[in-house]
Amino acid sequence: MNSDDETYILLLLSDSNLPTGAFVASSGLESYMKHGFGSNDPTAFIRDSMASYARSALPFVSDAYRLVSLYREMDVQGSSLDQSSSKLLSDIVALEELYETMMLNHVARRASKSQGVALLTLYTKALSPPSSFPLESDAKGVHEQMSTFFTQFKTMVRREDAHGHLPTCWGALTAALGLTLERSCYLHLFLHARSLLSASVRLNDIGPYNAQQILLHAVRPLVAAETSRCRSLTTGSIPHLIDDGAFDETIHGPANTWPLGEILTARHDLQHSRIFNS
Amino acid sequence: MLAIPKIDAGGGRISLSCHGSAAVFSELSSTYPLKLLSPRIPEDGVAVVYILTYGGGLVSGDRVNLSVDVGEESKLVLLSQGSTKVFKTRPGHRLASVQTSSHPPPTTQIMTFVVNPNASLFLLPDPVTCFRSASYNQIQTFRLTGNASAVILDWVTSGRRSLGEEWVFSRYYSVNEILVDGKRIAKDAMLLDDPQVDVKPLPERALAEKLKPYSCYATLFLVGPQVQAVITELVRRYHAISIMKMKGPDKVIWSLSPLTGNDHISVIVRVAGKETEDVKAWLGKALESVQYSIGKDVYRQVFR
């Protein structure tokens, strides 16, 4: 993929009208404000929330991305394609099962699943090319392979054989579109922060100009720093993605870094009145 | 006589089984700096073990490796005497020793638990207190089978507040993995550190900034038939909470989530408090009904 193509995909995925369900999520911000934490400036919350989210979710984005990427670049057909496709699905299921047991917060879990499934739908309904579209046969093959994968993945989620969590679905989607992993993680954190700012505006804590100002000046170094800090992280659960013996979960594994945020997010539903789902 | 396998430094093994109404240790051994003590208690089928360390704390490079087997039908209560203190270097040696590396090896505590059918584990230590610049890893794995129960408490304080320490250790990592009949139901990994990332022009954000106003964080797992009364009461109290806009944080705050799915058969509870004593009092009240499992006297030893 050349850089123009990549820019185009980035523009498309950063559209705030993209139906991903982020609109109803505040990732704990509403509860945090209600509990009397923080001033009206959401920067401190964004910082702590993003650091913890990056450390706990990016390993899953990255492993799902690498699995789908390997599958996408595989040059196989027929029965060995079916074999690799079912292997891919079972690896994704294992990843999601680990994420489910590591995210011990029912509110965040619920939000993650609804946004993850929205991404699967987005791929099948919007991002895969129409069948009538004249593509070269190589490109057509890759698209068909990806469409089949997303359709199967979605069916498994509907049958509750898979969870459809946001980080795994995001990793899978961006790999299918051919973004680089670096860009994928960067954009994922940017969108997390932007959605917090948009929640802050709707909670009437800051105005829309202020939100853009924070996004440009305060969030930018944070996104860059967290992306680079979490670059070498992995879940450690997919053997062929780990260099031999190089995985130490205390150093490279996913972890939650903000227990206060966990408590406040889980208490979301206890608010007497609330406008967000998480 | 069976030969007892050699145990490495800091290693320990506890193996408990139930004979009639008596809980009997088939093994209770440890090596320096770990020390295990079991006081006699009157309660049927219940045993208590204190996990201690010589000198009252652990230093950089120390490695504790304890494996515990709770036999069918028995109940094991594991306690510590005072908080587990983690030093950067051994006290008293600080002036004499020359720090050769800027990153001393972390202190590591590894504990593995097997809880057999109808057995119960009550892991109720005092909190871990990491001193200035200390680095600590704690890795705990729990394997429960066939209707086993577990109460797992894991908590950390901000440091020696009398010396003005407030979240100034360099790193605290704790992971608790729980498997029931071979299936993982929870893996809670928590990392508290000062990442020192460059986010210029933003100022650095210290660990204390993001954890304030609380100085003690606790995680409590409740799993299995022995703790259903505790869970039911906590779920009732939790759902009775209704939050209106608050002026400032409460002195204790807690949350409750089911471990898997939406039923409350096993739960995780997180508690934060401005004072460790507040958290302890909260836990004592929440766990009041475990005295019917472990006996009033043992309960009072823990939450006196």
Image: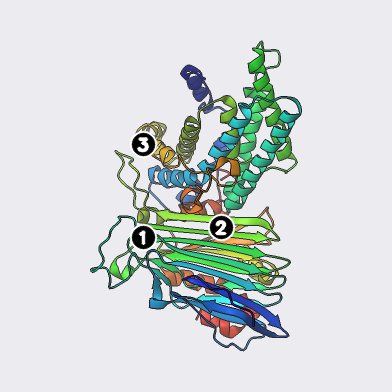
User: CB under 8 Å between callouts 3 and 2?
Assistant: no
Q: Are marks 3 and 2 on the same chain?
A: no
Chain at tag 2: B
User: Which residue has dot 3 on it?
Assistant: A221
Residue sitting nearer the eye, A235 or A44: A235
Q: Residues within 10 Å of mark 1 (few under 14, many from 20)?
A: many
**Quadrant housing the N terminus of chain B:** bottom right
Q: Which mark is residue B167?
A: 1
Chain of the residue under the numbered disc 1 shown in the image: B
- Residue at coordinates 34% horizontally, 64% vertically from top-left? B88
The picture quadrant where one finds residue B75 is: bottom right
- Residue B86 image position (x, y, % from top left): 39, 67
Badge 2 element: loop
Residue ID at (59%, 39%): A168
* Distance of label 3 from label 2 (alpha carbons): 37 Å
Amino acid at the residue labelled 2: Ser
Which residue occupies 58% across, 55% down? B187
2 and 1 marks on the same chain: yes
Q: Given the current orientation, which residue lies at the most extreme left position?
A: B95
Name the mark nearer the viewer: 2 or 1. 1
In the image, residue B82 lies at what x, y percent? 43, 76
Chain of the residue under label 3: A
Whether residue A249 can be seen here: yes
Tell me the residue that label 2 is attached to: B242
